[in-house]
Image (tube, grey):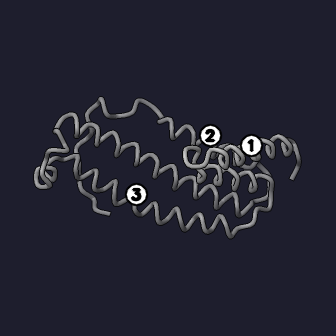
């Protein structure tokens, strides 16, 4: 990944706090954290790595969308030639985001294969794997499948709450 220097985004483009996606991912990750003193579960670790990768990808997607909106509004982006686009400093950041997203997409697939091959050894590991499944099955692509996974995860957490490992 290149280390091109870009100027800071205008103040109206910078977030004032954690994004909605960051809050969703962090709450899902927090739900998979095993209590202190519990046995380490390799599936839990694999799922945490997958979730971190997905969170970075989602954050970059949000930044891309913000930059693109800015470019359309302030530079009439769709009417610029490639040469004109390259002259705009924010275009370099779009290229960097695109490159990083490609890397993360490949890494996310590798981590997903690791999650699939790793057996959960604790209820927290099972819950983490269900959380990953719920993230992969998008509600707008398969509403019933997504709802079923989240329902099973809810039931599982309810049943296992308070069970010592």
Q: Which residue carries the number 1 mark? A: 151
Report the side of 141 relative to 162 (left or right): left
How far, Cα to Cα, is label 3 from label 2? 23 Å
Name the residue beneath numbered marker 2.
27
Quadrant of residue 69 within the rendered picture: top left
Name which residue lies at 57% across and 48% down: 138
Between disc 3 and disc 1, whose residue precedes?
3
Mark 3 or 1: in front is 1
Q: Secondary structure at mark 1?
A: helix
Verify CB contact (< 8 Å) between mark 3 and mark 1: no
Q: Are marks 1 and 2 in contact (CB under 8 Å)?
A: no
**Quadrant position of the N terminus in the picture:** bottom left
Q: Residue furthest right?
A: 163
Neighbourhood count class around disc 3 (C-alpha, 10 Å): few under 14, some 14–19, many 20 upward? many
Name the foreground residue: 99 vs 75.
75
Q: Position of residue 77 (x, y in %)?
A: 19, 43
Q: How far apart are labels 3 and 1 at the CA level?
A: 31 Å
> Residue 143: image x %, image y %?
62, 44
**Quarter where residue 155 is shown:** top right
- Relative to residue 78, is residue 120 drawn left or right? right
The residue where tag 3 is placed is 101
Picture quadrant where residue 111 is located: bottom right
Residue shown at 34%/46% (left/top)?
64
Q: CA distance from mark 1 to mark 2?
A: 17 Å
Of mark 1 and mark 2, the one earlier in the sequence is 2
- Residue 165 shown left or right of residue 13 in the figure: right
Label 2: how many residues lie within 10 Å, few (<14), some (14-19) or many (20+)? few
Q: Nearer the viewer, residue 141 or 7?
A: 141
């Amino acid at each position: 990944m290149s280390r091109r220097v870009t100027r800071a985004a205008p103040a109206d483009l910078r977030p004032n706090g954690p994004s909605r996606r960051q809050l969703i991912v962090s709450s899902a990750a927090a739900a998979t954290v095993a209590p202190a003193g519990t046995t380490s579960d390799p599936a839990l670790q694999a799922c945490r790595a997958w979730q971190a990768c997905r969170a970075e990808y989602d954050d970059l997607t949000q930044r891309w969308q913000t930059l693109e909106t800015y470019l359309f509004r302030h530079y009439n982006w769709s009417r610029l030639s490639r040469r004109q686009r390259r002259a705009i400093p924010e275009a370099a950041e779009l290229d960097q985001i695109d490159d990083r997203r490609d890397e993360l997409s490949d890494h996310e697939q590798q981590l997903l294969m690791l999650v699939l091959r790793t057996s959960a050894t604790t209820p927290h590991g099972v819950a983490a794997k269900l959380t990953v499944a719920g993230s992969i099955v998008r509600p707008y692509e398969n509403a019933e499948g997504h709802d079923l996974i989240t329902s099973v995860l809810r039931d599982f957490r309810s049943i296992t709450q308070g069970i010592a490992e």
